[in-house]
Amino acid sequence: MGNSTGVVVGHTIWKAFARSVTRAVRFVVRKVSDWTRPERAAPLLLGLMADLTRSKRDLLAENALLRQQLIVARRQFKRPKLRPRERLGLLLVARLTKYWRETILLIKPETVLRWHRSGFRLLWRRKTRAPCSVPRLAPDVVNLIIRLTRENRLWGAERIRGELLKLAIHVSKRTVQKYMRRARGPRPTGQRWATFLHNHSKQIWTCDFLQTYDVLFRPIFAFFIVALGSREVVWFNVTPSTLRRVGSTAAAECRAVGRGSSLPDTGQ
């Protein structure tokens, strides 16, 4: 009698435990389904995690269904309002596929590029922000620079800066040059630099070294050498390396190009 009672009690406890586990599993599945719905405010990360468990057929069907809904939404909403975090999410996801121009439907690809340029401007503004506000030059100092320039036509910016330092006035050379231009008269007539370049353009190479950034805002360096007369690119290189490495490589290869073509060989 006692054994049968114990079996009945154990079976009842097991059934209650099984029902509790079933309810818990259903609750978790329902919550995960709610979190991964497209209409949620932030479904991106959870949606990606849920996509890992789906088959390729299901993903293609869902992709076609979402694309059709986007086409309908594009006809009804001309300019959707996107939050800053939504714009950032589109920028990051667009980087993962090379077909992002064909995938984006609600906005134009130029809009995505404009967002990226705006982000770069914010980054560059922060990198180039002055540590402290520089006070403007006093009017008396400006008048003194103009007076020294007019009274001493042979003095350069460094000489005028030295004279100001004797008076305990600390001004940079570039600032002195800025106000010296106001005091200088018109330049003497004669052959200008543009005329010289026009007459000797076939014997001149010009170069430019610039720094730019990739899509992740990492610095990259570009070096160009162009024949001034024909506007032909003689040599170029784009690398994340430093200027010394790019310069040495450019010098070696340009000498070889100059010896093997009709372009001038600078010998440098």
Image (cartoon, rainbow, N blue to C red):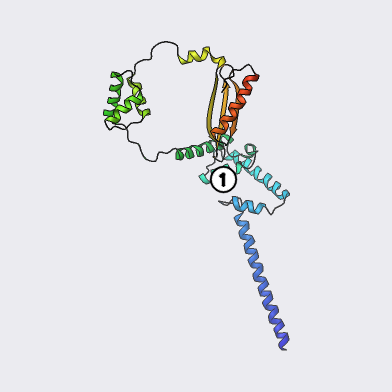
Q: Quadrant of the N terminus?
A: bottom right
Q: Quadrant of the C terminus?
A: top right
Farthest-out residue, bottom: 1
User: Where 4 falls versus 267 (above or below)?
Assistant: below
User: Where 24 falls versus 70 (above or below)?
Assistant: below
* Residue 43 position in % (x across, y down): 59, 51
Closer-to-camera residue (194/165): 165
Closer-to-camera residue (80/178): 178
Q: Residue at x 46, y 15 (%)?
A: 193
Q: Residue at x 65, y 65 (%)?
A: 25
* Residue 102 position in % (x across, y down): 64, 37
User: Where 232 falls versus 215 (above or below)?
Assistant: above
* Residue 223 position in % (x across, y down): 56, 29
* Residue 228 position in % (x across, y down): 56, 18
Label 1 element class: helix
- Badge count: 1
> For this view, does 83 lie left or right of residue 37?
left
Query: Given the image, on which type of amino acid does mark 1 rest?
Result: Gly
Query: Mark 1, residues whose alpha carbon is within 10 Å: few (<14), some, or many (≥20)?
Result: few
Closer-to-camera residue (261/132): 261
What residue did someone put label 1 on? 89
